[in-house]
Image: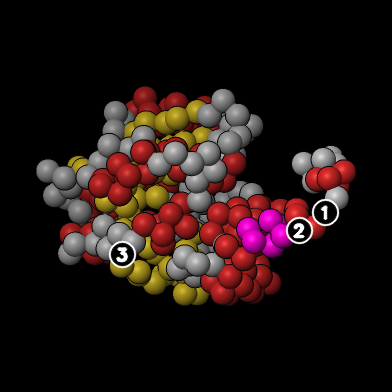
């Protein structure tokens, strides 16, 4: 029997952790009864009751595990590490707030069984704030034009990853891994499936202008040659004193 790992990153999701675990279990046991499952939560140093609830969930179900980060490692490093700790034949990564619909799980598994090593869930429509979606769209268009590597528009990481690809992630030596870029860069057989992003079920979003800016800068510095060349040219044209200024560092 194949095992599906579901990795769920969370931060201050006390209103959602129990509900999302129940929803995932119900979806798999009802619509994918021939598969076993494990659920792995990775908590990014929550300050509410998320960890208390996760302890209760894990105590009630041996197929659910939780990793408690010693500090907040950011929105990219924590999920990446979580994926690397899964043990299933494939790993599905989805958000804790129900914006990634659990009803997509059977569809992702279906494409995987057809031979896809990576199944990317692509937001074709969204119930999020229209201004935020517009800004995201502009960002994707810009990074796509500047990058030497294919960039997947409106892909947040929600999707399925074959065990072979997860093994590759474990062996990558990258202090600031950007999963979306790695997926596009490594060239594994990939299938994109559309979905509509839902509204957050409960609680407040932790994404804002600054987190989006962090994502943009990481993708720029990781996957755009033009930015690197510009930085290099700028450094060569500056006086030595400027290069050692606190602002540059």
The answer for how far apart the CA atoms under marks 3 and 1 are is 44 Å
Residue topped by disc 3? 190
What residue range appears in magenta?
A: 228-234
Question: Mark 2 falls on what kind of element?
Answer: helix
Q: Which of 224 and 109 is in front in this view?
A: 224
Residue 231 magenta-drawn? yes
N-term-proximal mark, 3 vs 1: 3
User: Where in the figure is residue 210, as x and y percent of width and height?
Assistant: 71, 53
The answer for how far apart the CA atoms under marks 2 and 3 are is 38 Å
The answer for how far apart the CA atoms under marks 1 and 2 are is 6 Å
Q: Is residue 132 left or right of residue 36?
A: right
Q: Viewer-nearest of labels 2 and 3?
A: 2
User: Where in the figure is residue 228, as x and y percent of width and height?
Assistant: 63, 58
Q: Is residue 126 left or right of residue 119?
A: right
Looking at the image, residue 149 lies above or below residue 5: below
Residue 125 visible (yes or no): yes
Could you tell me which residue is drawn at 13 percent across and 49 percent down?
A: 34
Residue topped by disc 2? 234
**Helix, strand or loop: magenta stretch:** helix
Q: Viewer-nearest of labels 3 and 1?
A: 1
Name the mark on residue 118. Answer: none
What is the crowding at mark 1: few (fewer than 14 residues within 10 Å), some, or many (at least 20)?
few
């Amino acid at each position: 029997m194949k095992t599906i790992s579901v990795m769920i990153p969370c931060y201050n999701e006390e209103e959602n952790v129990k509900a999302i675990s129940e929803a995932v279990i119900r979806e798999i046991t009802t619509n994918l009864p021939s598969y076993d499952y494990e659920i792995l939560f990775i908590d990014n140093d929550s300050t509410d009751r998320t960890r208390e609830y996760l302890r209760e969930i894990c105590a009630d179900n041996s197929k659910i595990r939780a990793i408690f980060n010693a500090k907040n490692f950011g929105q990219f490093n924590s999920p990446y590490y979580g994926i690397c700790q899964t043990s299933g034949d494939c790993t599905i990564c989805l958000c804790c707030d129900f914006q990634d619909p659990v009803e997509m799980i059977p569809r992702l598994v279906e494409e995987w069984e057809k031979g896809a090593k990576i199944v990317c869930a692509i937001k074709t429509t969204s119930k999020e704030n229209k201004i935020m979606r517009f800004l995201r769209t502009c960002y994707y268009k810009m990074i796509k034009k500047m990058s030497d590597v294919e960039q997947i528009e409106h892909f947040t990481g929600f999707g399925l990853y074959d065990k072979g690809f997860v093994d590759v992630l474990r062996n990558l030596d990258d202090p600031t891994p950007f999963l979306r870029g790695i997926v596009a860069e490594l060239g594994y057989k990939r299938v994109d499936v559309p979905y509509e992003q839902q509204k957050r079920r409960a609680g407040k979003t932790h994404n804002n202008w600054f987190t989006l800016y962090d994502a943009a800068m990481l993708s720029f510095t990781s996957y755009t040659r033009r930015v690197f060349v510009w930085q290099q040219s700028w450094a060569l044209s500056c006086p030595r004193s400027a290069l050692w200024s606190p602002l540059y560092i």
